[in-house]
Amino acid sequence: MGFFQNKTIWITGASSGIGEALAYKFSAGGANLVLSSRRTAELERVRSGCANPERVKVLPLDLVDTASLQDRTAAAIAAFGAIDIMVHNGGISQRSLAIDTGLEIHRQVMELDYFSYVALTNHLLPHFVQKRSGHFVVMSSVMGKLGTPMRSSYAAAKHALHGYFDCLRAETAAQNIQVTVLTPGYIRTNISLNAITGDGSKLGVVGENIGHGLAPEKAAEQILRVIEAGKFETYIGKFGMEKIGLWMSRFFPGFVMRRAPRLAPK
Ligand SMILES: NC(=O)c1ccc[n+]([C@@H]2O[C@H](COP(=O)([O-])OP(=O)(O)OC[C@H]3O[C@@H](n4cnc5c(N)ncnc54)[C@H](OP(=O)(O)O)[C@@H]3O)[C@@H](O)[C@H]2O)c1
């Protein structure tokens, strides 16, 4: 029996990109799924593409509507009686210089990419504690570990995830609760199309790096292996500049910081 057989997995941001690809892989592995994001029709499309659509519950939600997340969590648990793995994945990127980015934009990105993850975790954690098991899988980014131009809000939110989830891992290890933080490089999704700019509009462009990024299906395969191995924190993506940059920033941070001004997104 495969590792994901009969596990129940709740994925946010399941209507597109990495979340969608994960849904197909988990379902093929025999998991029950709860799929969440704002667009119900897109979630239904993903459900019908799953290997076992009868074992997929579509649960629409808006992550920034934090007042609704307690009810949504109760509904997610009720769908199959328990949640085994929560994949915190829904999110938005940002592309603007700090000088052009008002506080409102920073708050918007922080609400979605950081506070919504904390809110859902607060609601789900008592369930994991009660059953003495559970696994949080958290979608950070290479930008959660270093900083380059045009991404100040996004990098700040992703860095915050590491602080929160590293503490949570330390607090809950004795209760058999696992935390895996993923730091993907470029993955070929709609992330840059949907990225918010300094005036609040969408970037609406597929960046060159994203366009040449790893296919989301391949990223999903890597992610399944990492979850099964119970890793604490792992890079997902091609062996490219992002992976080298991550490694360099750990051992030679000054070297990366000196070159960072030239690393504006393409
Ligand atoms: N692609 C990359 O290169 C890359 C690299 C590093 C990290 N990541 C991270 O990977 C995660 C997934 O992104 P992706 O690349 O798959 O991009 P994507 O294709 O744009 O998917 C984003 C997902 O987030 C959902 N979402 C956005 N706002 C939401 C809200 N307010 N409430 C609920 N769901 C919301 C979207 O669904 P709806 O529109 O239906 O709500 C969609 O399913 C993000 O956390 C991103 O930061 C991506």
Image: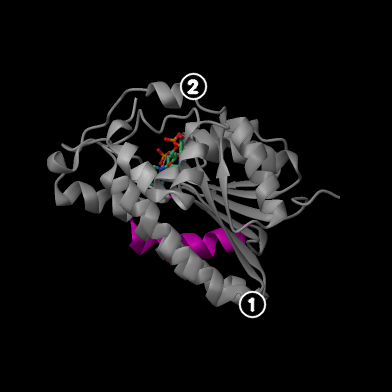
Q: Which residue is mark 2?
A: 212
Nearest the camera: 28 or 159?
159
Circle on res. 53:
none
Q: Nearer the viewer, mark 2 or mark 1?
A: 2
Circle on res. 175:
1
Judged from the image, the secondary structure of the residue bearing numbered disc 1 is helix
Q: Are marks 2 and 1 in contact (CB under 8 Å)?
A: no
Residue range highlighted in magenta: 61-79
Q: Position of residue 25 (x, y in %)?
A: 68, 38
Residue 64 seen in render: no
Ligand 1 shows up in the quarter that is: top left
Q: Residue at x 62, y 73 (%)?
A: 173
Q: Residues within 10 Å of mark 1 (few under 14, many from 20)?
A: some
* Residue 84 to residue 255: above or below: below
Is residue 186 covered in magenta? no
Nearest the camera: 218 or 112?
218
Question: What's the CA distance linking mark 2 and mark 1?
Answer: 41 Å
Q: Position of residue 96 (x, y in %)?
A: 22, 36
Q: In this rendering, would 39 be left or right of 133?
A: left
Q: Residue at x 50, y 27 (%)?
A: 213
Q: Residue at x 47, y 36 (%)?
A: 242
Q: Quarter of the image holding residue 20?
A: top right
Q: Position of residue 108 (x, y in %)?
A: 25, 50
| Residue type pointed to by label 1 | Gln
Is residue 73 covered in magenta? yes
